[in-house]
Image (cartoon, coloured by chain):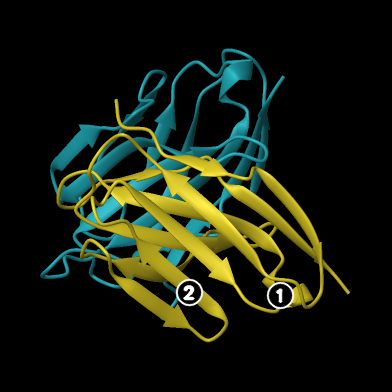
Chain colours: A yellow, B cyan
């Protein structure tokens, strides 16, 4: 059974601080995605990483895929209240099926 | 272009009742999925479909059934509701991307309570 563990589970920080969220597994994934979910809504895709060691930037968010394609991280620089939400990683299990992580709930205080 | 729509938004069921959660997408995506999300947790895959007439089990299929008679529709059936099925249910659709990384588009969810 493939599992994706995210840490930390909860994070509450002040506006302007930096943070990193981790997504770890013992399984190899062909690609990995990060989603953000706001209360009462479905998840929305932030990024997909495909190659081991790949780094992608989306404004203040930096995503990295581990060299062995078993783990990933999301780093947010100078967090803002608008970054508040549930962050989910999802690893590709085959061509079209994804296994979701346990989630990290982020709250950024103004 | 409505994307992925789900009905109903909320539902309360009694133990043993049955219901169908509806999901429709207008993006002509081949792949469709049903997930459940328990409070504060990630998503668990219930069933998925790679095209009309083709469905397969995900991680937590027990107590549920699906059908896919058209590209657009992917209903989820609960036959004998149990309190353990209290959850938020999300439908999603995606298309194949060469090189990997199919983006999933999610509906707004159905919040189901079984009492």
Q: Earlier in the sequence, mark 1 or mark 2?
A: 2
Q: Percent x, y for residue A31?
A: 25, 57
SS for dot 2: strand
Q: Percent x, y for residue B13?
A: 65, 26
**Residue at point 23%, 50% (across, down):** A68
Residue A28 visible to an observer of this rendering: yes
Q: Quadrant of the C terminus of chain B?
A: top right
Same chain? Circles 1 and 2: yes
In this rendering, would B113 be left or right of A26? right
Report in which chain the residue with disc 2 lies: A
Residue B74 visible to an observer of this rendering: no
Residue that sits furthest to the right in the current view: A110
* Residue A110: quarter of image: bottom right
Q: Disc 2 marks which residue? A: A62
Q: Disc 1 marks which residue? A: A79
**Residue at point 30%, 46% (across, down):** A70
SS for dot 1: loop
Residue B53: numbered disc = none
Q: Residues within 10 Å of mark 2 (few under 14, many from 20)?
A: some
How far separated are the C-alphas under marks 1 and 2? 12 Å
In this rendering, would B100 be left or right of B48? left
Residue that sits furthest to the bottom in the current view: A59
**Residue at point 41%, 31% (across, down):** B77
Q: Nearer the viewer, residue B68 or B33?
A: B33
Q: Nearer the viewer, residue B89 or A1?
A: A1
Q: Percent x, y for residue B16?
A: 57, 13
Q: Quadrant of the N terminus of chain B?
A: bottom left
Q: Percent x, y for residue A75?
A: 55, 67
In this rendering, would B39 be left or right of B53? right
Labels 1 & 2 near each other (Cβ < 8 A) = no
Report in which chain the residue with disc 1 lies: A
Residue B71 vs B87, above or below: the answer is: below
């Amino acid at each position: 059974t493939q599992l994706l563990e995210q840490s930390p589970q909860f994070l509450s920080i002040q506006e302007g601080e930096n943070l990193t969220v981790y997504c770890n597994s013992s399984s190899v994934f062909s690609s990995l995605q990060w989603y953000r979910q706001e209360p009462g809504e479905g998840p929305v895709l932030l990024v997909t990483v495909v190659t081991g060691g790949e780094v992608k930037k989306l404004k203040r968010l930096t995503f990295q895929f581990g060299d062995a394609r078993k783990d990933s991280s999301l780093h947010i620089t100078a967090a803002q209240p608008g970054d508040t939400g549930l962050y989910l990683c999802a690893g590709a299990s085959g061509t079209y099926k994804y296994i979701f992580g346990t989630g990290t709930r982020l709250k950024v205080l103004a | 272009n409505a994307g992925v729509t789900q009905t109903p938004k909320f539902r309360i069921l009694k133990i043993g009742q049955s219901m169908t959660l509806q999901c429709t997408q207008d993006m002509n995506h081949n792949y469709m999925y049903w997930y459940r999300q328990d409070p504060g947790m990630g998503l668990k895959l219930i069933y998925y479909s790679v095209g009309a007439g083709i469905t397969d089990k995900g991680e937590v299929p027990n107590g549920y059934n699906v059908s896919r008679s058209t590209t657009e529709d992917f209903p989820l059936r609960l036959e004998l509701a149990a309190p353990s099925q209290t959850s938020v249910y999300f439908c999603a659709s995606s298309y194949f991307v060469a090189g990997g990384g199919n983006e999933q588009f999610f509906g707004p969810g159905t919040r189901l309570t079984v009492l």
